[in-house]
Image (cartoon, grey):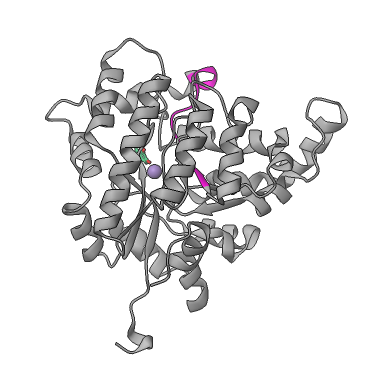
Amino acid sequence: MTPASKPIRRIATEEAFSIPEVAAGLREVARAPGNSLDLVLVERIYDAKVDDVQARLLPRLLDLEKERLKDMDANGVAMHLLSLTAPGVQMFDADTATELATLANDKLAAVIKRHPTRFAGLATFAPQSPKRAAVEMERAMKKLKLNGFILNSHTHNEYLDNPKYFPILEAAEDLDGCIYIHPRAPSDGMAAPFRDYGLDSAQWGYGIEVSTHAVRMMVSGVFDRFPKLKICIGHMGEAVHFWLWRLDYMNKNAQNRGSAPKTKLTPSEYFKRNFVITTSGQESHLALDFSIKALGIDNVLWAIDYPYQPSAPAVAFMDSAPVSAAEREKLYHGNAERVFHIKLE
Ligand code: VNL
Ligand code: MN
């Protein structure tokens, strides 16, 4: 094929999978007493009635090499950057979570080995046990050659600005492994208004949960301690960059009256230095244009959010985006290759 007719390499960067052992654990979580807002989704997917339309999701999460590859081929998608789907191992006790994270990473590495041009993967870890998590993070990148990390937002209602998690941030920074902060439902303290109208998950709650997580990290000074730490957030940046001017202005006020710690940089400076965003499940050209203008073309990556969102419209959205050919190359694969250490073809 001549270079001109070579199809563009589409790398989708927020593509979900599960393994039977984690799915079984989540079915137990669904059946146990509990009040977490995540139970709405966990019950729907992992303990669904056979006639539940959403029950089709579980087989599609568990499948890696059959339907998924066909779907990728049919839509011209070269690669899925896979991640263990939300809530990952973060609702389990520390020992179970640590064990299942290791198992999920081993299985992920095995499937990538079988299809090195079709799959890359983000390693999972158990924040419930930060020191063991850091050990697993090193194994996952150095030995298993995984491409970075997935974290499904809060863990038992705590966020990455909590110093107990600093061993995790230190490991990620040392390994140059970007942490993709994927949503889960809003934590207990802010869950109540999200219990109605299906607001618990992707419609609204997910974005509020992750944007709050990102803002907590910026205003707490985490990035002064870990200046090279890279964080990725999906869904067109969960709207954080829309807020940067007001965040900067009001964070300064909060610092001056002593309710926020003094930081070296402003939230907008941290967001541009330490974050990248993906387009997962947010197929608006207006939002894409704003994102590129606000953050720069090097900081926006394409994603589908398979199997929660269909592939064809995600491809059509980026194929028809009003950007130059060179920009489209960055959005579709160049930025993903750089941020997630994916080999050039
Ligand atoms: C949904 C969408 C769920 C995207 C997801 O993870 C996700 C949903 C649990 O629509 O339920 O990544
Ligand atoms: Mn997702």
Give the image quarter of residue 303: bottom left
Q: Position of residue 46 (x, y in %)?
A: 24, 28
Q: Nearer the viewer, residue 162 or 216?
A: 162
Give the position of the N terminus as an image quadrant: bottom left
Image quarter for residue 160?
Answer: top right
Ligand 2 position by quadrant: top left
Q: Is residue 184 magenta?
A: yes
Looking at the rendering, which quadrant does residue 112 occupy? bottom left
Residue 114 place in picture, x, y as percent: 24, 57
Q: Nearer the viewer, residue 229 or 16?
A: 229
- Left or right side of 131 for 33: left
* Residue 264 vertical position relative to residue 87 in the rendered view, above or below: below
| Total marks in image | 0
- The residue at 46%/56% (across/down) is 284
- Farthest right residue in view: 256
Q: Residue furthest toward the top?
A: 33
Q: Nearer the viewer, residue 1 or 120?
A: 120
On the rendered image, what quadrant is the C terminus found in? bottom left
Above or below 293: residue 56: above
Q: Residue furthest bottom?
A: 2
Relative to 31, is 163 above or below? below
Magenta stretch bounds: 179-191
From the top left corner, tell me how far across and down residue 189 is, in percent.
54, 18
- Residue 45 appears anywhere in the view: no
Q: Residue at the spot x=43%, y=32% of the render? A: 184
The answer to whether residue 254 is above or below residue 33 is: below
* Residue 113: % across, % down: 28, 56
Residue at 32% x, 38% y is 104
- Magenta segment: does it hold 159? no
158 with respect to 28 (left or right): right
Residue 125 placement, left or right of 258: left
Report the residue at 39% width, 21% height from top.
95
